[in-house]
Image (cartoon, helix red, strand yellow):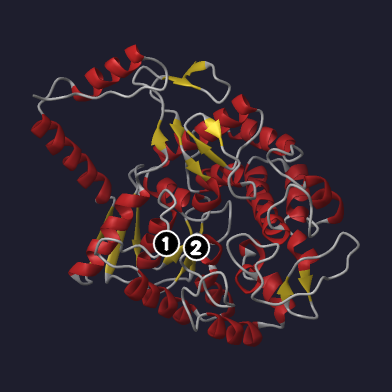
Amino acid sequence: MTARVGVSFVDVEGARRNALNEQKAQSYDTIRQDVRADWNQWLNRITVGGGTDAQRRVFYTALYHALLHPSVFSDTDGRYTGMDGVVHRTEAGHVQYANFSGWDVYRCQVQLLALLAPREASDIAQSVLNQGLQAGYFDRWTLANGGSGVMVGDPLPAIASAIHAFGGTGFDAATLLRTALADRQDNRQRPGHEQYDTLGYVPAGTKGVWGSVSTTLEYAAADYALAQLAHRLGDLTSYDTLLRASGNWRNLFNPATGYIQPRAADGTWPAFTPAQKTEYVEGNAAQYTWMVPQDLPGLFAAMGGDAAVTARLDTFFTHLNAGADQPYAYLGNEPSFGTPWAYASVGHADRAAAVTHRALATLFTDAPGGLVGNDDLGAMSSWAVWASLGLYPEVPGTAQLVRTEPLFTTATVHRGDGTSLTVGAGSRRRSLR
């Protein structure tokens, strides 16, 4: 006996229709073979040469995981239940996606999707916009057709901007920009925005805010990403406003300590240690001080210059996955994702490669449980893919790729638009556009 299953978030009839249209009454073996063939096509969007069998297994397992989410949410006829509880229908030939682990995936997972599949990524960005219009704000972590408010920052507009930068431009980017600008003043989307907009930072102890320092840094990075979208769309007034806001990290940098740390509303600095977790989210001061991907040159100048930064990075990477309690790298969680590539900004791309290769060799395996941390809907796995390619999309809302030594002898990315990118000798920072 064969049981056939269909799923719909609209109605039972939709589930029946989905099962019929997707399975076409084929046998289990035929469906299994077709799915395997489909996945092989997707996994062959990146072809690599060299490396060991174990390294290739880790790489393609990570690529598989990175491509699993967001999930198709609309029925085969385009219907889906929106964030407002109303049944909507996508435009013909398009799909509504759901399940956005925003705080996690905005850093490097959606960039990988857009690199490999700009058409599908465009639908993902349109789905972000649809969610925001229907809910009245952009939630940080959406599940099916509801918001959860999980984590901090303002990642969904940044996701759309990154997709646009990588060539996924088939969505209403102008409306997304306009909506995101308005929703920056919504407490559901940006708790503490009043203080952020007036003081230039979220003060320690702000009611309703989890981690004032982390929240400030997340808002600043999101503002930079949105500024890049505004610039590409020709809205230079919004670009200037957002670009200024993206520098708000400076208001929490204490030159007396060399760290980005909590600050009171009156401008004073509370007692502080580099390993403290208070006012940070899933990390500590030593880990979050590096999280200014939009302005590493400015951060490094404030830290004392390239030599001082290099020495600090060397110490920081004494441990690769120290956890949130120690003042070292925590590559098992998202705030440290981009830090290895900071070496490239001080002329040491070789040390960035050494760290990422050491992480791939010691923190990831091809055995069960071979991920260093929570995959967070492909976020952790996408990091492993980028690290293996010797590339990283460090700057939010742009298509700039920091270049280091790849793990494999050769690697070619075959994009869904017919173009390809071959990883080889060249500049350390490469842009697709």
- Give the mark, 1 or 2, whose residue is nearer the N terminus: 2
Q: Residues within 10 Å of mark 1 (few under 14, many from 20)?
A: some
Are the residues at dot 1 and dot 2 in contact (C-beta closer than 8 Å)?
yes
- The residue pinned by badge 2 equals 333
Q: Is residue 411 left or right of residue 86?
A: left
Residues 112 and 370: in front is: 370
Q: State the image coordinates of residue 120 (x, y, percent, origin top left).
A: 40, 37
Residue 377 x, y percent position in the rendering: 42, 48
The residue sitting at 58% across, 22% down in the picture is: 84
Residue on which disc 1 sits: 373
Label 2 secondary element: loop
Q: How many other residues sit within 10 Å of disc 2, few (<14), some (14-19) or many (≥20)?
A: many
State the mark number for residue 175. Answer: none
User: Can you see residue 90?
Assistant: no
* Residue that appears at 54% across and 45% down: 159
Quarter occupied by the N terminus: top left
